[in-house]
Image (spheres, rainbow, N blue to C red):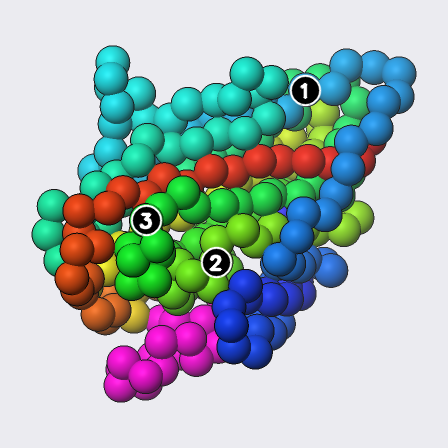
């Protein structure tokens, strides 16, 4: 996903925020878009997860960073339970790789968070991606309340997960990725202090960013958790769908 325009519609009780500036026809929506057809050839987009930027990500039994659904379509990172009022899950990256022999168009990430109600109302999330195609710049997609990110999808109409060995272009490549860090308080994140389109402006930081701008790692300025939310857990799940 090479980023040119993006729209984020936040699933909140207030008017959604429009984030323009990343990916061709790229859209965050409150419902899943994208589909999956059947054509001649082998379709395969296995998902894998990593912990990036030398951060500490939660692991489960047998040091598992993530689990896959039985059909291999959904990756879920190991739940994290904050041990304090300031916490971070670390930079959890999910990558889809086209290992089949036919291109997959209109790749769509659908993201969700399984979390206690109090924690989802107090935690924040930093979401970035280097996208499909050429270039390694990590772009900011969203940095704000987890409540405005949960259950959203991210689509790039017309872009392609190309087959292995195909030269990468600005809108095509064999891999696509998404990096998510759930946090609260003063923590190191890939988003630093920049909140997208004013989200979090009530913190008094004056640091606002536009979706699609290069992500600037740094120390977050979000509020810490309150009440019993520190005893609740959160786990991010990602699913990719596509046309072929």
Lower position in the chain sequence, tag 2 or tag 1: 1
Q: Which mark is residue 149?
A: 2
Task: Provide the residue designation for mark 1.
Answer: 44
Lower position in the chain sequence, tag 1 or tag 3: 1
Classed neighbour count for the residue bearing mark 3: other residues with Cα under 10 Å, few (<14), some (14–19), many (≥20)? some
Q: CA distance from mark 1 to mark 3?
A: 34 Å
Q: Secondary structure at mark 1?
A: loop
Identify which residue is drawn at 63% across, 47% down: 1
Quadrant location of residue 194? bottom left
**Residue farthest to the right, as pictured:** 40
Which residues are the magenta region?
194-215
Q: Is residue 199 magenta?
A: yes
Q: Secondary structure at mark 3?
A: loop
Classed neighbour count for the residue bearing mark 2: other residues with Cα under 10 Å, few (<14), some (14–19), many (≥20)? many
Q: Secondary structure at mark 2?
A: loop
Q: CA distance from mark 2 to mark 1?
A: 27 Å
């Amino acid at each position: 996903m090479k980023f040119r325009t993006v729209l984020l519609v936040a699933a909140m009780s207030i008017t959604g925020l429009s984030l323009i500036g990343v990916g061709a026809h790229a859209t965050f929506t409150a419902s899943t878009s994208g589909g999956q057809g059947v054509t001649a050839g082998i379709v395969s987009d296995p998902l894998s997860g990593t912990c990036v930027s030398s951060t500490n990500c939660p692991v489960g039994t047998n040091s598992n960073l993530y689990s896959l659904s039985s059909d291999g379509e959904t990756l879920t990172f190991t739940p994290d339970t904050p041990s304090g009022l300031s916490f971070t899950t670390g930079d959890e990256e999910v990558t889809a790789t086209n290992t089949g022999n036919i291109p997959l168009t209109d790749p769509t990430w659908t993201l969700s968070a399984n979390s206690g109600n109090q924690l989802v109302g107090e935690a924040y999330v930093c979401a970035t991606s280097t996208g499909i195609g050429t270039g390694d710049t990590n772009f900011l997609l969203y940095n704000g309340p987890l409540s405005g990110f949960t259950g959203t999808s991210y689509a790039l109409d017309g872009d392609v997960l190309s087959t292995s060995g195909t030269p990468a272009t600005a809108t095509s490549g064999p891999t696509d990725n998404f990096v998510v860090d759930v946090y609260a308080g003063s923590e190191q994140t890939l988003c630093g202090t920049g909140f997208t389109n004013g989200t979090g402006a009530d913190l008094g930081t004056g640091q606002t960013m536009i979706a699609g701008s290069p992500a600037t790692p740094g120390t977050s300025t979000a509020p810490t958790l309150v009440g019993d939310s520190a005893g609740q857990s959160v786990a991010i799940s990602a699913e990719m769908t596509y046309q072929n």
